[in-house]
Amino acid sequence: MDKTGIEKRFGITPSQWCDRASLVGDRSDGIPGVRGVGSITAARLLEGGLTLEELPGSGRLQGKLGARIRQQWSDLERWKSLAQLRKDLDVAPPSGTASPELPPAPKVLETLDLW
């Protein structure tokens, strides 16, 4: 999916994806999100390019939902960091050599005495 597809489908920019994931949740990453915040509400809260960090001062956290978001603020910050790509890790470049061929599944099961 490209930038235009994300904007059309989710109502946010790609740079807001982790903000959205923290609000809405993402089961594949184990992020529960805030109860009552779905895709449309997250898009409304983040409208205009707002980030999660800018929400408290935006005046958009109103009513019960706003209170719930404020109550879960430390969780939201943690969930956003879980969804973000880490750029501080040293990763060795590929060696250029192929890994050894893996044995067929039946052989592995037999070796591990699972068959």
Image: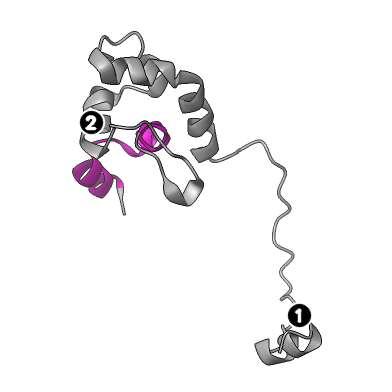
> Could you tell me residue 47's position as x and y percent?
23, 25
Examine the structure image and report whether residue 53 is included in the region drawn in magenta.
no
On screen, residue 64 above or below 20: above
**Of circles 1 and 2, which is in front?**
2
Disc on the earlier residue, 1 or 2: 2
At mark 2, the secondary structure is: helix
Instruction: Look at the image and tell me in which quarter the N terminus lies.
Output: bottom left
On screen, residue 21 above or below 5: above
Q: Residue at 49% across / 47% down in the picture?
A: 29
Indicate the amino acid at tag 2. Thr
Q: Residue at 29% across / 45% down in the picture?
A: 3
Q: Residue at 43% across / 48% down in the picture?
A: 27
Residue occupied by mark 2: 41
At mark 1, the secondary structure is: loop
Rendered image quadrant of residue 99: bottom right
Q: Residues within 10 Å of mark 2 (few under 14, many from 20)?
A: some
Q: Main secondary structure of the magenta part?
A: helix
Rendered image quadrant of residue 56: top left
Q: Which residues are magenta?
A: 3-23
> Which of these two is toward me, 97 or 115?
115
13 on left or right of 95 = left
Residue occupied by mark 1: 100
